[in-house]
């Protein structure tokens, strides 16, 4: 946990921001323009909220230099107020402090190599030959499997699971309930013999390699590779309840929102944005710089950067049912249009009007 109160001057100095106003003003946290009080900082990052600026009761507002004359209270000047807000929020982080050391109830293999600065909480399990880097925090009930590598300054929140052979780079965060390195969905159908109709498990022989500064949300699953590794590159952020199947590759700086599902062996480029509830089929390639809007279904590779969507928005149920019936008639309507075009072409002597 960091400071619970700071002066305006201290905030400005720590983040190298210009301030206008009383540098001695004591600040206790952050709030929105509409709810902030005199001891709180707010910010204006979206112009549609500019109408709230004149009415705000915040002690300080983070604004762009262009809006400084319109701000009725003390202000901090930032070219990117939202980024400044993110950094200020870290100054007021109220997470409880961690205690360096290994809790007596933790089960730690004798062969594990653990830096002296690591904090390992109650009921954790650390497997054989695991390597835990400097200032790593492993929350209560978490599991680090055999032969794992956890990079320095990473955090496993309570009940995170990192299975055998997985590697995490420096500064990663794995949130509660996430499972990294579980088996991919690999089974071969048995087509003959006494076990006909059953499934034969395919041993998942790869692992998961995660780069630096990756954040993986609660209850997300990143499956290990079937033969080669599943790979998550540096600076990727993944929300809660995301499924990343075996052998998927996710490029640097990509963001994946909640409830998205990515099927096996798909390659997603760098700096993509995958919206909530998106479903991406397997064995596809998506190039760098693609944005897939929430709820979309991607069934083919995308070879050009840009924004993509699919499906329809919510409609009144009766209207949706009518449109669904019409959607089922599209193939027949297409065939009729083609036939009509042929007839027109024949009547016009070979050239359609």
Image (cartoon, rainbow, N blue to C red):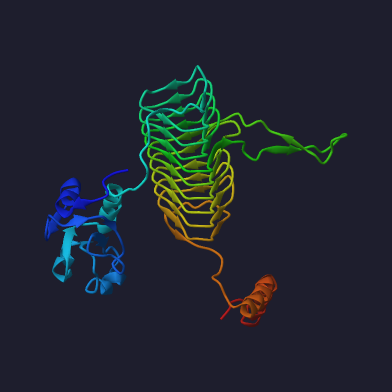
Which quadrant is the N terminus positioned in? top left
Q: Is residue 78 visible?
A: no
Task: Identify whether 339 is placed above or below 114.
Answer: below
What residue do we see at 25% from left, 60% from top?
Answer: 40
Seen from this angle, which residue lies furthest top? 111
User: From the viewer's perspective, is 338 left or right of 90?
Assistant: right
Residue 260, percent across and down?
53, 53
Viewer-side residue, 307 vs 176: 176
Viewer-side residue, 255 vs 264: 255
User: From the viewer's perspective, is 19 left or right of 217?
Assistant: left
What residue do we see at 24% from left, 51% from top?
Answer: 5
Which quadrant is the C terminus positioned in? bottom right
Q: How many marks?
A: 0
What residue do we see at 28% from left, 69% from top?
Answer: 47
Seen from this angle, which residue lies furthest front? 104
Residue 310, percent across and down?
54, 63
Task: Identify whether 277 is placed above or below 247.
Answer: below
Viewer-side residue, 188 vs 60: 60
Residue 169, percent across and down?
41, 33
Instruction: Tell me which corner region of the image, top left, top right, bottom left or bottom right, holds residue 336.
Output: bottom right
Seen from this angle, which residue lies furthest right? 194
Q: Is residue 50 visible?
A: yes
Residue 202, percent across and down?
68, 33
């Amino acid at each position: 946990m960091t400071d619970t109160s700071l002066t305006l001057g201290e905030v400005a100095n720590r983040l190298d921001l210009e301030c206008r106003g009383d540098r001695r003003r004591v600040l206790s946290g952050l709030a929105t323009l509409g709810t902030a009080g005199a001891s709180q900082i707010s910010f204006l990052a979206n112009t549609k909220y500019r109408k709230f600026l004149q009415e705000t009761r915040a002690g300080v507002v983070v604004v762009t230099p262009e809006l400084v004359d319109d701000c009725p209270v003390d202000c901090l000047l930032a070219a990117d107020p939202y980024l400044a807000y993110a950094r200020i929020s870290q100054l007021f982080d109220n997470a409880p402090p961690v205690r360096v050391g290994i809790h007596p109830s933790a089960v730690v293999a004798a062969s594990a190599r653990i830096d002296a600065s690591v904090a390992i909480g109650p009921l954790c399990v650390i497997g054989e030959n695991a390597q835990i880097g400097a200032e790593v925090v492993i929350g209560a009930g978490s599991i680090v499997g055999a032969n794992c590598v956890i990079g320095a300054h990473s955090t496993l929140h309570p009940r995170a699971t990192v299975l055998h052979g997985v590697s995490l780079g420096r500064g990663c965060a794995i949130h509660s309930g996430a499972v990294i390195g579980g088996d991919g969905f690999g089974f071969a159908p048995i087509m003959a013999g006494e076990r006909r109709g059953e499934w034969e498990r395919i041993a998942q022989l790869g692992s998961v390699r995660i780069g630096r500064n990756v954040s993986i949300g609660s209850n997300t699953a990143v499956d290990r590779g079937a033969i080669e590794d599943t790979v998550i590159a540096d600076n990727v952020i993944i929300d809660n309840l995301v499924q990343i199947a075996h052998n998927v590759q996710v490029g640097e700086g990509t963001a994946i929102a909640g409830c998205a599902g990515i099927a096996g062996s798909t390659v997603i480029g760098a700096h993509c944005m995958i919206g909530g509830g998106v479903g991406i089929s397997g064995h596809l390639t998506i190039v760098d710089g693609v944005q897939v809007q929430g709820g979309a279904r991607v069934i083919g590779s995308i070879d050009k950067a840009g924004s993509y969507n699919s499906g329809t928005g919510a409609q009144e149920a009766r209207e949706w049912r009518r449109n669904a019936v019409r959607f089922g008639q599209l193939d027949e309507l297409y065939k009729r249009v083609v036939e009509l075009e042929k007839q027109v072409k024949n009547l016009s002597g070979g050239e359609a009007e």
